[in-house]
């Protein structure tokens, strides 16, 4: 038995880039999100909610499972200095682990059926965004996908990156209102419990979601502390873009993310097939 | 020999016509007898085995005699509604001529003409018959006609059939009426 | 043959039945011995069919109430005699002539329909066979020969009471008095012996063979379809079973019509199945009230048996037919495929009519299933027995 | 002796069937115990025989023939894999599903016949076996209840008839239907299409609701489980045989694309139905079609990786079949089981499906698109599992079997963690046996498996290490939290009400109407069109012209005029 490998995988899953890093990045992103929404007061409120969500996690087995699968997804991102080779990453594994984490949380958060449709469509578009570059390069390794710099693939990567950015708010549950024709969430679903559940989920999702997109779109950083910091900076930047887009949409009073994502997904697919044919 | 065969064929046709036009025991028996005689003559003239011809004659005659046993008394000829049967008798003869006309130049062909006419007319009668006794008579005629189409074994089989059908009672059973 | 248990009806005098039984047994023995040689000759397939028929008669006699066993034994022996005679007589006009008294004897059994109606099928068959044979043998234009071939083919169909010469079968009519006696017991012998003789004696010219084959093929497919649809839509149990006979006969006619070794073997096996499986099932079905759904495995198994699935008697028939048809022309095999798929539909309707037999009925059903298994698993042995 | 090892598993099941039948009178469950023991023993014998027999192909020809078909059996790596999958599902069924001795005997017999059919050495014998299996399964299904029996029976009957014709065509074209003797050129497109149709009918890998889905709607799951445990591997074995007949290739390249696309479409359709299901059972009923679609997609690619992935995915399907009837309709155990059978890592289902999608991606851009479709279907399936937890529970919920659940989940997780081993020891040998080395020599080395996990060119899955860790941590978390002791979470808590109360509509909390995530009503348009066509009637003013009913009556009754008409018409035809 490769006990050494198992130990390293355990370390990766529970610490870096797994649970611990995910939690740290999650707290950071939540605070940043709070700043973007309500300034300093929002930051304080976001930090309080994040810490409470972490405290509440101990009594909620589903929360642990969500965290486990989110960490599994994070292990797929090409984070420098990870204990296991990032070439072991598998995009599909990460996407599915992330989906499992999100749906597990949905199971545990009743009254959120209305968001199910948006969430599913968001996940599908997100899969297209991450899968499109893979179609041309016939690989599901995030690192090699990020490293691909064939001119024919650049448009695909740009479009799929844009699509990914549009889908992330849907994945992270940042788009609030239910879709017309769907039952509104029950009153208590807006209460502190639901808010806490949403924060807990987002904290687990920020790193794997943004990290995967970055791994696929951006060339892999060098395997040293500087590279690691640069990668985290890009991830936080991506998160900031996502949060800003939501803040702007909130100010405008309409969230066009899904409406834009669906046609763009088709466009990305067409571009990917064309690129594959050319290359 | 052609002449004898032709006489036999015509006699057989007349006999079967009588069977198809009669509804009572005497008419049926005479018709059956005439058919037997005609077919036997034609068979002998066409050079069939004498033993078979004799068997045919014997079977037909016994069948005819047994037909006298039961059934409606009298001749029962040309009852109302029998006109189509009369027309059919003529048409069937013509049809038989068309069917075996190509071999009418030889006794075998002529004998076959008689047998075919007998069989066709007997079948037509059986398809429209309502009384059991008439059906038995027509059945025996049909058997004789079919037997006359073949040689020794067929003639013997036809004779046996005629006797067997003669042995069946003509009285209707309850379920049969 | 045996009868469905029905309200008592007028019976023929016992002495006539006894005589019929004794004569039938005697004739059967003579045919088996082939005496007088030359006039009587029992071909191996007919011999096998006769042996199977004896089993069926025995089973039928055992199945009916003890009060009717002697009567049914006599009827069965008489039927066996007729079967043996039709299979053994070498001269076609003689067969035609014999069909008439046999038809009258069968029609004379007390039933729902008068003798004058019951007799139509056999006499028509007799005429078609006799006339057809004459036309085949007579000199003249070629269309006469083709007409003769048509007569032979239609004669077989008429004897079986198949489409288009379907006969009335009453709801409460005993099987031995109804036309099923011909369809399920007597006609298979004729349909097995006559084509074999025609082919062995090379009595058919090529164009005549084509006519006979084509007519039998066409009517086989028609009977197959008609049987399936009819069995599914039939209002009465007896009607449904009559239609189910058409399905088996359809396969048999197609097999004969293919005029091929495998096709004839398929027809032979189909005939054995008709006599050994289908006919006894009619008797068992008549012994038990039909139910919506039989829950007992034996009854459930019937659906599979009737659908012709392995390991039952229908499977080798289908295999051989498909083989023969594919060798001839694949579109024909495709048509056959559709027919076979349709044939599975009517099984459920029929199985329901068997219900849940008890006592003798259950044992009889088990015996039928075993016979079907034997036919389905060991067709090569049966083909060897039948020289096919 | 090797041939004895080949004959032993079916023989064991046949003997168990006889014993179960005869000893069934002594105790109600005796038959089931005997059947279960025989099934597990057969698995042991199968594995041991194949392993210590040197893992070389064996062939056994008997001097007799059954149903007109010469009897012969063959054992190679693919047959070993398929037989083991069948036996695993059968063993789970017989061990954990309560059933009487008669039913257990029937299940054992069907299993024995299925194993022999899988090992048949000719296509004609396979058709015979398929026919016999279909018959036995029909009896097993109808014994429990009538629901969906005719759909299954009709489909399977059509399958064996079509396969029989394929065998006959093969005999006519190639002189024989014995797999090892058929010339490669004999596998022409028509023959292959017939084989494929039979396979698709058996596996239900079609983009509409087939018997495979309908069978799960029944109250008693045992019969349906038996049918699927037997038929799904049998169906896929036909496509594997097609590779063997064509020396690793199918007669035309477009056939690969056709079936790959059909597989992806099947998966999408099944996932669409699952996310719109009205009950938990209906959602579970789509797990097998979804898996069958992905398996077909991979199998049809014509690459060694595709075949290997299909074999692994088939293993997941087999375990899914065995696990599903043990799942309760309510509570977390049911949700966990659902999640695993719909491809949650690190179970065997996940590993198999992952390799299926990767194989499609590696085969080319177009097949990559189909792989993407498969992945999308996979995501929708996972969403359907979540949605199912919000659905109202059935009036009479199925309690399932906790031990069966534990065994099934345990096997799924063990298979998932041991995916590398399974790949190296089972899947890759199948691929290398079926794919001709000449055409695919370079492809073989690109698929690797070991204790650590699976290595494929398009991406690795360290199932043994990372998957093992995830499984261990996940199970530990669930056990520590005592999740299995809890009645449920979220809306599931409502399901603690007694079934009678729910049946009467008394609920402590209001139920939300849970609509489908995606509205796929347009999917049913063809069916609606067909119904419309069926509804068409001849306008009343023309009905007097065509009196089919009267014609039918005239033909059914003995009408001499009709006879004369037909006879004269035929006479005119033949004399022309």
Image (spheres, rainbow, N blue to C red):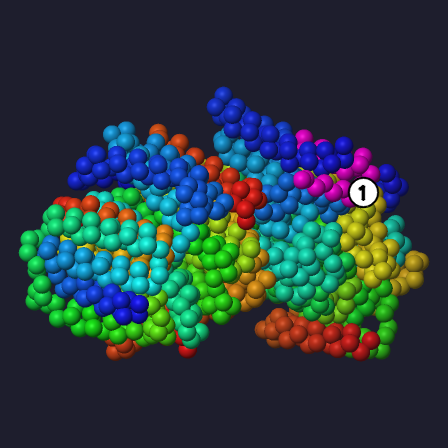
Q: Which residue is mark 1?
A: D56
User: Residue D133's image quarter?
Assistant: top right
| Residue for point 70% across, 41% down | D61
Please say whether residue C10 is visible from this viewpoint: yes
Extreme residue toward the left, this view:
B74
Residue C6 in the image: x percent, y percent? 23, 39
Q: Quadrant of the N terminus of chain C?
A: top left
User: Residue C109's image quarter?
Assistant: top left
* Horizontal side, residue D118 vs residue A14: left or right: left
| Residue for point 26% across, 61% down | B41
| Residue for point 80% across, 78% down | A278
Determine if the magenta segment contains residue C337: no
User: Residue D117's image quarter?
Assistant: top right
* Horizontal side, residue B35 vs residue C200: left or right: left
Count the numbered circles shown.
1
Stretch in magenta: D41-63
Which element type, helix, strand or loop, lies under badge 1?
loop
* Horizontal side, residue D260 vs residue D459: left or right: left
Residue A252 in the image: x percent, y percent? 61, 75
Q: Chain of mark 1?
A: D
């Amino acid at each position: 038995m490769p006990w050494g490998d198992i130990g390293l995988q355990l370390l990766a899953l529970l610490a870096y880039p797994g649970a611990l890093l995910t939690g740290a990045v999650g707290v950071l992103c939540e605070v940043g999100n709070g700043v973007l929404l309500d300034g300093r007061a929002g930051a304080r409120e976001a930090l309080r909610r994040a810490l409470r969500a972490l405290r509440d996690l101990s009594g909620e087995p589903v929360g642990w499972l969500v965290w486990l699968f989110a960490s599994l997804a994070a292990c797929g991102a090409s984070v420098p200095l990870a204990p296991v080779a990032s070439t072991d990453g598998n995009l599909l594994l990460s996407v599915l682990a992330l989906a499992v984490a999100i749906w597990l949380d949905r199971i545990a958060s009743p009254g959120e059926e209305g968001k199910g449709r948006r969430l599913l469509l968001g996940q599908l578009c997100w899969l297209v965004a991450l899968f499109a570059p893979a179609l041309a390069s016939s690989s599901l390794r995030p690192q090699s996908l990020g490293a691909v710099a064939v001119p024919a693939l650049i448009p695909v990567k740009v479009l799929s990156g844009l699509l990914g950015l549009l889908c992330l708010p849907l994945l992270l549950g940042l788009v609030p209102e239910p879709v017309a024709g769907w039952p509104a969430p029950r009153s208590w679903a807006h209460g502190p419990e639901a808010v806490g559940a949403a924060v807990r989920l987002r904290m687990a999702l920020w790193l794997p979601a943004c990290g995967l997109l970055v791994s696929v779109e951006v060339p892999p950083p060098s395997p040293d502390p500087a590279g690691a910091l640069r990668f985290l900076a890009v991830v936080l930047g991506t998160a900031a873009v996502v949060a800003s887009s939501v803040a702007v949409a909130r100010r405008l009073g309409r969230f066009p993310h899904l409406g834009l994502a669906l046609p763009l997904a088709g466009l990305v697919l067409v571009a990917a097939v064309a690129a594959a044919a050319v290359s | 020999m052609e002449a004898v065969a032709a006489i036999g064929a015509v006699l057989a046709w007349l006999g079967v016509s009588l069977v198809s036009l009669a509804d009572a025991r005497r008419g049926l028996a005479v018709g059956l007898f005439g058919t037997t005689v005609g077919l036997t003559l034609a068979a002998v003239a066409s050079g069939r085995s004498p033993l078979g011809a004799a068997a045919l004659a014997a079977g037909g005659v016994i069948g005819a005699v047994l037909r006298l046993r039961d059934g409606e008394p009298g001749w029962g000829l040309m009852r109302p509604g029998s006109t189509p049967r009369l027309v059919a008798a003529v048409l069937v003869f013509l049809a038989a001529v068309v069917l075996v006309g190509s071999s009418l130049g030889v006794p075998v062909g002529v004998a076959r003409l008689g047998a075919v006419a007998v069989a066709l007319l007997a079948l037509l009668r059986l398809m429209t018959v309502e009384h059991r006794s008439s059906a038995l008579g027509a059945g025996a005629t049909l058997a004789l006609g079919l037997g006359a189409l073949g040689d020794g074994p067929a003639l013997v089989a036809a004779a046996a059939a005629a006797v067997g059908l003669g042995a069946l009672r003509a009285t209707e059973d309850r379920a049969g009426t | 043959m045996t009868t469905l248990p029905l309200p008592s009806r007028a019976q023929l005098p016992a002495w006539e039945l006894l005589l019929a039984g004794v004569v039938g047994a005697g004739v059967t023995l003579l045919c088996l011995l082939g005496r007088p040689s030359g006039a009587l000759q029992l071909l191996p397939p007919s011999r096998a069919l006769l042996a199977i028929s004896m089993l069926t008669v025995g089973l039928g006699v055992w199945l009916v109430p003890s009060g009717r066993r002697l009567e049914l034994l006599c009827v069965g022996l008489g039927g066996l005699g007729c079967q043996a005679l039709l299979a053994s007589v070498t001269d076609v006009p003689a067969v035609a002539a014999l069909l008439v008294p046999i038809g009258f004897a069968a029609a004379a059994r007390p039933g729902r329909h008068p003798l004058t109606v019951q007799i139509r099928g056999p006499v028509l068959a007799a005429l078609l066979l006799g006339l057809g044979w004459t036309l085949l043998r007579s000199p003249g234009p070629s269309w006469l020969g083709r007409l003769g071939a048509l007569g032979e083919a239609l004669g077989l169909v008429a004897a079986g009471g198949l489409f288009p010469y379907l006969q009335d079968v009453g709801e409460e009519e005993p099987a031995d008095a109804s036309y099923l006696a011909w369809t399920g017991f007597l006609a298979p012998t004729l349909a097995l012996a006559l084509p074999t003789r025609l082919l062995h004696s090379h009595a058919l010219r090529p164009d005549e063979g084509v006519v006979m084959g084509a007519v039998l093929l066409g009517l086989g497919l028609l009977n197959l379809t008609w049987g399936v649809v009819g069995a599914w839509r039939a209002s009465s149990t007896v009607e449904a079973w009559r239609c189910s006979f058409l399905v088996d006969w359809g396969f048999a006619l197609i097999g004969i019509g293919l005029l091929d070794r495998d096709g004839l073997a398929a027809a032979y096996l189909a005939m054995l199945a008709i006599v050994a499986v289908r006919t006894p099932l009619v008797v068992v079905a008549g012994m038990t009230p039909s139910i919506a759904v039989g829950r007992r495995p034996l009854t459930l198994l019937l659906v599979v048996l009737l659908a012709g699935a392995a390991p039952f008697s229908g499977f080798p028939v289908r295999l051989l037919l498909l083989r023969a048809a594919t060798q001839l022309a694949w579109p024909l095999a495709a048509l056959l495929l559709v027919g076979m798929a349709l044939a599975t539909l009517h099984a459920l309707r029929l199985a329901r009519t068997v219900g849940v037999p008890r006592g003798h009925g259950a044992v009889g059903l088990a015996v039928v299933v075993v016979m079907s298994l034997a036919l389905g698993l060991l067709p090569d042995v049966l083909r060897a027995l039948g020289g096919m | 002796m090797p041939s004895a090892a080949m004959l032993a598993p079916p023989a064991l099941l046949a003997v168990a069937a006889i014993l179960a039948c005869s000893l069934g009178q002594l105790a109600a469950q005796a038959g089931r115990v005997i059947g279960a023991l025989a099934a597990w023993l057969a698995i042991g014998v199968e594995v041991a025989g194949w392993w210590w027999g040197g893992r070389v192909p064996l062939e056994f020809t008997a001097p007799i023939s059954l149903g007109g078909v010469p009897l012969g059996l063959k054992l190679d790596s693919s047959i070993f894999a398929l037989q083991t999958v069948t036996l695993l599902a059968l063993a789970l069924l017989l061990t954990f599903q309560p059933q009487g001795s008669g039913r257990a005997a029937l299940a054992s017999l069907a299993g024995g016949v299925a194993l022999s059919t899988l090992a048949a050495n000719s296509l004609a014998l396979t058709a015979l076996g398929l026919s016999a299996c279909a018959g036995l399964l029909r009896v097993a299904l109808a014994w429990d209840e009538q629901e969906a029996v005719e759909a299954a029976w009709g489909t399977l009957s059509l399958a064996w008839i079509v396969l029989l014709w394929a065998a006959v065509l093969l005999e006519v074209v190639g002189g024989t239907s014995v797999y090892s003797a058929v010339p490669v050129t004999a596998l022409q497109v028509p023959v292959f299409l017939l084989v494929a149709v039979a396979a698709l009918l058996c596996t239900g890998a079609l983009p509409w609701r087939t018997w495979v889905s309908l069978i799960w709607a029944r109250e008693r799951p045992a019969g349906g489980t038996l049918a699927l445990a037997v038929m799904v591997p049998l169906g896929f074995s036909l496509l594997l045989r097609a590779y063997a007949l064509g020396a690793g290739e199918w007669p035309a390249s477009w056939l690969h694309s056709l079936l790959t696309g059909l597989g992806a479409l099947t998966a999408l359709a099944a996932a669409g139905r699952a996310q719109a299901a009205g009950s938990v059972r209906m959602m579970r009923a789509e797990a097998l079609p979804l898996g069958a679609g992905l398996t077909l997609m991979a199998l049809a690619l014509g690459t060694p990786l595709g075949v290997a992935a299909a074999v692994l995915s088939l293993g997941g399907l087999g375990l899914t079949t065995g696990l599903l009837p043990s799942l309760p309709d309510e509570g977390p155990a049911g949700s966990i089981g659902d999640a695993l059978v719909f491809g949650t890592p690190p179970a065997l289902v996940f590993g198999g499906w992952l390799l299926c999608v990767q194989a499609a991606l590696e085969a080319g851009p177009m097949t990559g698109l189909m792989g993407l479709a498969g992945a999308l279907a996979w995501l929708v399936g996972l969403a359907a599992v979540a949605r199912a937890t919000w659905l109202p529970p059935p009036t009479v919920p199925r309690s399932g079997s906790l031990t069966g659940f534990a065994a099934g989940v345990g096997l799924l997780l063990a298979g998932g963690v041991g995916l590398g081993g399974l790949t190296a020891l089972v899947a890759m040998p199948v691929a290398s046996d079926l794919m001709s080395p000449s055409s695919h020599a370079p492809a073989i080395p690109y698929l690797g498996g070991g204790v650590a996990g699976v290595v494929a060119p398009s991406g690795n899955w360290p199932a043994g290490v990372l998957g093992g860790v995830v499984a261990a941590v996940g199970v530990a978390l669930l056990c520590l939290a005592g999740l299995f002791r809890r009645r449920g979470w979220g809306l599931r808590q409502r399901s603690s009400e007694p079934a009678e109360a729910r049946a009467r509509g008394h609920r402590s909390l209001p139920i939300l109407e849970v609509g489908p995530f995606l509205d796929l009503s347009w999917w049913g348009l063809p069916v609606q069109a067909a119904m419309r066509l069926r509804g068409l009637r001849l306008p009343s003013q023309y009905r007097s012209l065509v009196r089919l009913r009267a014609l039918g009556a005239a033909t059914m009754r003995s009408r001499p005029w009709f006879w004369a008409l037909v006879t004269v018409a035929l006479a005119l035809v033949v004399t022309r």
